[in-house]
């Protein structure tokens, strides 16, 4: 019974985060920019703030060879949605459906974190993991997200962390 409730809660959180990502990609309410990170705020239907960045380097390989790959938006972001109790949820979308059998890995200065996947989205498993990742992002200079598609294409997306700490502080001030 408890395990069933935990899975249901986890599924609902993933659905909320996926809806947030779709909305974040369409929003024009950018309120600030801190070097490589942008800060967004939405007030309707409920208050939500997030910071987001695009990769500075994208490498796609298959069988050890660099290949081209069609991908939609590639984004790393942190979301605050106070009405849902979301306070700094780290998320990633790679622009393609991830292999569900392979975790997405986030490497920040040698500190590695596995993210669970749902379609083309990935998140840490717990709020405690979110906290650890945010702290590592504050200390780091870049983050590399590695993932694999269902077709076997390996992707490595590098994100600059210049401006991350300032952007995070701005989002926390507005929604934390």
Image: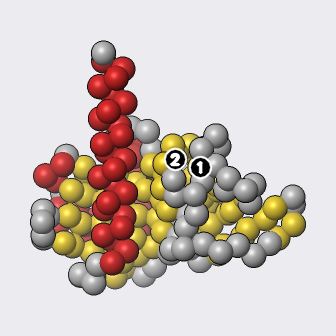
Coordinates of residue 15 in the picture (x, y in percent): 34, 50
Give the mark nearest the N terminus, 2 or 1.
1
Q: Which residue is drawn at 37% across and 57% down?
A: 18
Coordinates of residue 138 in the picture (x, y in percent): 43, 59
What sort of colour scheme is used for the picture?
secondary structure
Identify the residue under disc 1: 104
Residues at discs 2 and 1 in contact (Cβ within 8 Å): yes
The crowding category of the residue bearing disc 2, from other C-alpha atoms within 10 Å (few below 14, some 14 to 19, many at least 20), is: many
- Element at badge 1? strand
Coordinates of residue 124 in the picture (x, y in percent): 45, 44
Determine if residue 146 is in view: yes
Quadrant of res 33 = bottom left
In depth, the one of 42 and 119 nearer the eye is 119
In depth, the one of 13 and 136 nearer the eye is 13
The crowding category of the residue bearing disc 1, from other C-alpha atoms within 10 Å (few below 14, some 14 to 19, many at least 20), is: many
In the image, 11: left or right of 41? right
Q: Which residue is drawn at 49% across and 48% down?
A: 118
Coordinates of residue 80 in the picture (x, y in percent): 25, 58
Q: Is 36 above or below relative to 14?
A: below
Determine if residue 107 is in view: no
Query: The N terminus lies in which quarter of the figure?
Result: top left
Identify the residue under disc 2: 117
- Picture mark count: 2
């Amino acid at each position: 019974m408890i395990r069933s409730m935990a899975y249901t809660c986890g599924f609902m959180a993933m659905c909320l985060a996926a809806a947030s990502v779709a909305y974040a990609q369409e929003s024009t309410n950018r309120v600030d920019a801190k070097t490589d990170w942008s800060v967004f705020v939405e007030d309707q239907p409920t208050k939500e703030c997030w910071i987001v960045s695009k990769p500075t380097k994208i490498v796609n390989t298959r069988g050890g060879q660099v290949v081209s790959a069609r991908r939609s938006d590639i984004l790393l972001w942190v979301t605050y949605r106070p009405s849902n109790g979301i306070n700094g949820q780290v998320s990633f979308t790679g622009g393609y459906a991830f292999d569900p059998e392979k975790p997405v890995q986030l490497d920040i200065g040698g500190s590695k974190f596995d993210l669970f996947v749902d379609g083309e989205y990935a998140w840490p498993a717990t709020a405690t993991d979110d906290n650890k990742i945010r702290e590592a992002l504050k200390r780091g200079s870049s983050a590399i997200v590695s993932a694999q598609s269902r077709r076997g294409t390996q992707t490595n997306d590098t994100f600059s962390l210049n401006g991350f700490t300032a952007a995070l502080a701005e989002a926390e001030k507005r929604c934390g």
